[in-house]
Image (cartoon, coloured by chain):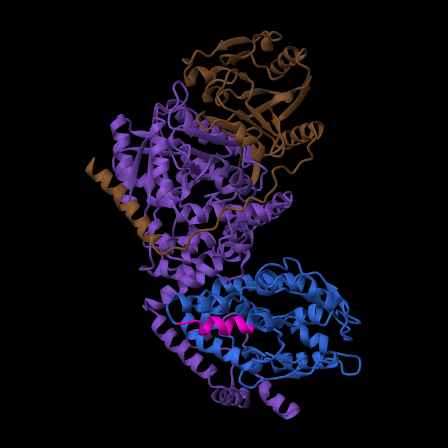
Chain colours: A blue, B purple, C brown
Amino acid sequence: MRVALFATCVNDALYPSTAIATVKVLERLGVEVDFPAAQTCCGQPQFNTGYRRATEPLVHRMARAFEGYDHVVTPSGSCVAMVRDNYPRIGARAAAEGRGQGLADAAASLVPRVRELTEFLVDVLGVTDVGAYFPHTVTYHPSCHGLRMLGLGDRPRRLLQAVKGLQLIELPGAEECCGFGGTFAVKNADVSAAMGDDKIRNALSTDADVLCGADNSCLMHIGGMLRRRDAPQRALHLAEILASTEEEPLR
Amino acid sequence: MSGTFIGMPSFPEAARDAVRDTTLRGNLRHATHTIRAKRAGAVAELDDWAQLREAGKQIKDRTLRHLDTHLEQVERAVTAAGGTVHWAADADEANRIVTDLVKATGETEVVKVKSMATQEIGLNAALEEAGIRAYETDLAELIVQLGDDLPSHILVPAIHRNRGEIRDIFRDNMADWGRPAPDGLTDRPADLAEAARLHLREKFLRAKVGISGANFMVAETGTLVVVESEGNGRMCLTLPETLISVVGIEKVVPTWRDLEVFLQLLPRSSTAERMNPYTTMWTGTTDGDGPRAFHLVLLDNGRTDTLADEVGRQALRCIRCSACLNVCPVYERAGGHAYGSAYPGPIGAILTPQLRGTATELDASLPYASSLCGACYEVCPVAIDIPEVLVHLREKVADQGGRGHRLERAAMRAATWLLDHPAALTAGERLASRTRKLHPRRLPGPGVREWTNSRDLPELPAEPFRDWWKKNHE
Amino acid sequence: MTSASSARDRVLGRVRRALADAPEAPEVTRDYLVSHTPDDPATVLDLLHENLADYRAGVHRSTRQHLPALIGELLTGHGARTVVVPPGLPGDWLAGSDARLRHDDGHLTPAELDSADAVVTGCALAVAETGTVVLDAGPGQGRRALTLIPDLHICVVDVAGQVVASLPQALPRLDPTRPTTWISGPSATSDIELDRVEGVHGPRTLEVVLVVE
């Protein structure tokens, strides 16, 4: 089984610890992981802001970078949703605009092989107990793309519940958007901040040590708000909790 | 009513004030969260909701695909049943038709059933200009009219008002429009409903002209359907001698049987009821029962432009249930007025820029009034993929250039170039990491300032992931 | 009517141009349920009863023989002294009431209807899953205004012939050419804080009598 890590641009540049944790979890489970260096970004920021044509080179790049791998695993639900939902649309639109089948073919070759981390662990590897240890209280925010577009369901929570020492506390209003939304966070900064305020109020009401998510773009927003308030809670990606073990616990 | 949406600021500006209005935030939060839970319960009662939703979507898509045929059919059927059909290409034409019809009756007042189409075309203002007073009879529309306010929700136009505010509006303003509010009016919803009943009763009983919209019109039979709760609809549709219905051309459904789908989808999505209290169905005119004259005004007003857009046309499936408003986190914080049209919330953000175009700053800002969280698509009873249409409309707005978008386009192109050249990207990432100690917590400049006003920037790592990988795996 | 016909041509022309390149839409798949309720008359009746009551209608069961007495009791109980009677209402239904009867000959004005306390009607159909009675202005129901203006509506449902479980079962039994009113509980509103309150413009009291053999 040839497995490639799609680290995502956000994790590569800002949250390498999440990508490293993903590698560690997969390797611990006996998966041989590769990181094709030609990868960069799925193009979600451009596409969602209205620059579809600017996304097209990245669709080609993604398809080429991950050619030949059985599975492409990524610790980001929104990037998977971008590939799964929007790459076929980008391909179809290009074809409809008379620019050939190339993009559609590139999308079709990549889409079925891309898995969000918790999908890969639960559905492909068939595990929920990854041998992790994390003696803290945790509440989980299921980011919108994972929740509604990918339908991750209870996969992330099942993985968390199997972590030794971890106490999972339900997050009130969990299904509500945190207010990140890519460029929405700056184009509608006031509404975005108001949504974030409500999210962290709910998160802090759980008294959990950690607010866990599976999408670092959302956690950048939520975590940034928590730190601005010097709140006694930190935002942490699910992969980093799963990577933590008794031998090598996360600080 | 003096209120108008014309000349409103762009969405982010209008939303800024709404976000800071704690009363408004509280009112909207309370109302939307109440209905959210109820809707989920009403939908969960039906095991075949997904199949009904798919059928609703398909009926609408198929109808839209053959809209010309169905419109001609509805015209024939209504005419054969004693009604008169008028066509209006835009708001001005529709307003002129209705005004002339009212004038021809010699009346100077009309009673109105809540109708999005007449709200959209600004009918009340047009009638007022012609010396005709239009009385809104839906409770929430009455609250809006008496408060000289604007609607902020499709189903509950006065959702931004709480019971105390409604009591004050009734007490202060009812006398100017007719029967005053009862002495010592409390803010109990039942007492407020009773006050509305007393205030409007005399108007219903003397009304000679009624004006409505319609939820559905059935092509094969010429039947119009109005779905309501209070009975004000029945009053306006039944008691006057003349009835004028202004209906968007997308409201047509092909067959009588199709109602079995929509009458299951609409009430549960809208008021979270198994069935709304009253539904009236009528076909032309009936001797000895209801209005003697019936006029149907078929309204385009931008709908055919929407129909021409292969991605955007799905917005015409909308049955105006307002479920998308009730689950929308942006609507909940920004309120309905920020959307600057009769259609607020997620559906407004895709409908208004298509009906009106994106020439104004406000209309061009609407497709961005969403975090793309997808809650609207999830609850939509006719499966309108609102996020898909929003992104599609953002592309149109970006393509037209204008304020901010030329710079943005350049930035996006630069980003794509960088992301398509991993060596340059890596160099940039390394530079950022090495200078990270120099980065302040708050930054000026467009984009970054908006971010750092309310959130810290992430701390940059010592090295990007690809460098770690190189050291450890290659 | 040149301008009117040209507006028609303009709109239809725009529709056709908008659809010129549109792909054909698929046939409608109707794989939703015809009914959500077991096909058992007693279960359907209980469901109708329950759903009517859930939306604050008064619900009563009666034999045909006891019907006049029950209607009389309901009218008295609500203090109704004047009752509107639609054409074709079975004569004996009001035999147990001493209220003053106002037979509608089509000429009662809205104000006259407003001065009546109640109206008694039959119906065309009742739908169990939604708790709905449907009136189609047939005999014993009268024109729509009769059941709209008086504040108390007593509606008699013949359980043997008039109850269906679901909407897909209801629509084929109705005649689209007739003016039709679907009634699910007394008038109500959700316009204040999206919370349901019963009793606005339509009858504030709805009593439904289910006549069983």
Between residue B321 and residue A207, name the one nearer to us. Answer: B321
Residue B160 in view in this figure: no
Between residue B44 and residue A139, name the one nearer to us. Answer: B44
- Tell me: residue B109, above or below residue B439: above
| Quadrant showing the C terminus of chain C | top right
Q: Position of residue C23 (x, y in %)?
A: 41, 55
B466 left or right of A136 in image? left
Residue C2 on the magenta span: no
Residue ID at (50%, 74%): A106
Residue ID at (69%, 27%): C41
Q: Position of residue B294 (x, y in %)?
A: 34, 28
Residue ID at (55%, 41%): B271
| Quadrant showing the N terminus of chain C | top left
Residue A201 in view in this figure: yes
Q: Position of residue C163 (x, y in %)?
A: 62, 26
Q: Which quadrant of the structure image shows residue B409?
A: bottom left
Q: Which quadrant of the structure image shows residue B69?
A: top left
Q: Which quadrant of the structure image shows residue A225?
A: bottom right
Residue A106 on the magenta span: yes
- Tell me: residue B88, above or below residue B84: below
- Tell me: residue B105, above or below residue A81: above
Prevalent SS, magenta region: helix
Residue ID at (54%, 77%): B457
* Residue interval drawn in magenta: A100-110
Q: Position of residue B309 (x, y in %)?
A: 37, 57
